[in-house]
Image (spheres, rainbow, N blue to C red):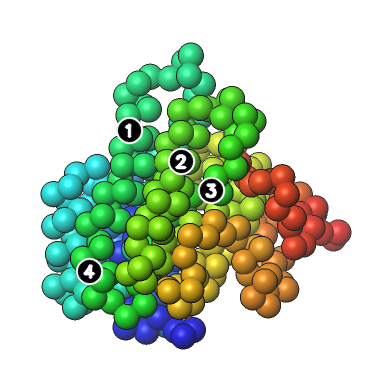
């Protein structure tokens, strides 16, 4: 396998950032990309809409179907998947990328914020995966992938932002259980997580501004890693919690400098990367 030509990817949160990068990488092969996201009108602080994303996908060589989708709504997701299957003849791959983040500790969290994170991250992932299964059963090499972390249950990953950690680890619990549930159906279910922070709007606006962006890798590293996963046989590639650079290195990648936003800055490790996960290359700044 090695090519996604003609495959249909249903990607949540694909109007920008990681989701869009995954879609554009698949589009280079001639894939069909369903851009399932909420942003139909331009946002004052966030670049991109489902329509600008569709144009980028088409410019990259794929076909695009932009759909306004709220992953909290069963009707919205169901309608979108029906539309995708009607237009492209089925669904081969589902990418659960949509996610909400709020790093407030328990004592200060507004429960509406927690509910939003739970509904989008954990519940939305479970819902999209559930509704996709009938389509994936008909696909030749079906994959479900979550942008969620390894299940490394340490206090340090929870103590400062327990509500977010619960919602994000919930996505990974869906991977753990659903991989087992679907193993006999030969539908792959995997997680992918970045070793470093990724230059996205969330990092820019919520986590540390331009300084954090400069210490990040680009979304292209996750796009390349996702492409690698989707081109592997589903029956043999399931129940994994992949770290982006480790996966790429194990499959022959040697040049990771191309993913740096600023090679003169030390890369910032992301949340949730297990202590025993060794980076294949140094995260230190490259000497000018």
Mark 2 or 3 closer to N-term?
Answer: 3
Mark 1 is surrounded, within 10 Å at the Cα level, by few (under 14), some (14 to 19) or many (20 or more) other residues, namely some
Dividing the picture into quadrants, the one containing residue 248 is bottom right
Label 1: element kind? helix
Give me the C-alpha separation between circle 2 and circle 3: 7 Å
Give me the C-alpha separation between circle 2 and circle 4: 26 Å
Establish if 252 lies above or below 240.
below
Give me the C-alpha separation between circle 3 and circle 1: 19 Å
Label 3: element kind? loop
Mark 4 or 1 closer to N-term?
Answer: 1
Establish if 219 lies above or below 158.
below
Q: Is residue 177 left or right of residue 248?
A: left
Residue 263: percent from left, percent from top: 74, 58
Do the CB atoms of the residues marked 2 and 3 lie less than 8 Å apart? yes
Give me the C-alpha separation between circle 3 and circle 4: 26 Å
Q: Front-most of 226 and 174?
A: 174
Q: Front-most of 208 and 7?
A: 7
Q: Which mark is residue 135?
A: 4
Do the CB atoms of the residues marked 4 and 1 lie less than 8 Å apart? no
Res. 61 in view: no
Label 2: element kind? helix
Q: List the residue tagged with mark 1.
A: 116
Residue 131: percent from left, percent from top: 22, 57
Q: Residue furthest front?
A: 184
Give me the C-alpha separation between circle 4 and circle 1: 27 Å
Q: List the residue tagged with mark 3.
A: 149
Q: List the residue tagged with mark 2.
A: 168
- Please name which of the two marks, 4 or 1, marks the residue nearer to the observer: 4
Residue 50: percent from left, percent from top: 29, 58
Do the CB atoms of the residues marked 2 and 1 lie less than 8 Å apart? no
């Amino acid at each position: 396998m090695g090519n996604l030509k003609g495959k249909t990817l249903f990607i949540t949160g694909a109007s920008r950032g990681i989701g869009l990068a995954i879609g554009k990488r698949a589009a280079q092969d001639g894939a069909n990309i369903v851009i399932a996201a909420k942003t139909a009108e331009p946002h004052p602080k966030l670049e991109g809409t489902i329509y600008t994303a569709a144009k980028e996908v088409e410019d990259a060589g794929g076909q695009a179907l932009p759909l306004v989708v709220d992953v909290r709504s069963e009707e919205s997701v169901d309608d979108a998947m029906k539309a995708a299957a009607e237009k492209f003849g089925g669904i081969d791959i589902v990418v659960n990328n949509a996610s909400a983040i709020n790093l407030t500790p328990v004592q200060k969290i507004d429960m509406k914020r927690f509910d939003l994170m739970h509904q989008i991250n954990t519940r939305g992932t479970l819902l999209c995966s559930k509704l996709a299964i009938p389509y994936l059963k008909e696909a030749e090499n079906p994959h479900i992938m979550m942008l969620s972390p390894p299940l490394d249950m340490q206090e340090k990953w929870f103590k400062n932002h327990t509500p977010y950690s619960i919602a994000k680890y919930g996505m990974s619990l869906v991977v753990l259980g659903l991989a087992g549930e679907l193993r006999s159906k030969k539908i792959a279910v995997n997680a992918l997580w970045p070793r470093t922070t990724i230059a996205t709007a969330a990092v820019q606006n919520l986590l540390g501004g331009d300084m954090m962006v400069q210490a990040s890798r680009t979304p292209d590293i996750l796009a390349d890693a996702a492409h690698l996963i989707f081109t592997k046989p589903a029956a043999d590639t399931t129940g994994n919690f992949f770290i982006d650079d480790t996966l790429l290195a194990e499959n022959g990648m040697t040049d990771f400098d191309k993913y740096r936003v600023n090679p003169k800055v030390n890369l910032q490790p992301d949340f949730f990367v297990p202590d025993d996960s060794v980076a294949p290359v140094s995260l230190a700044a490259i000497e000018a």
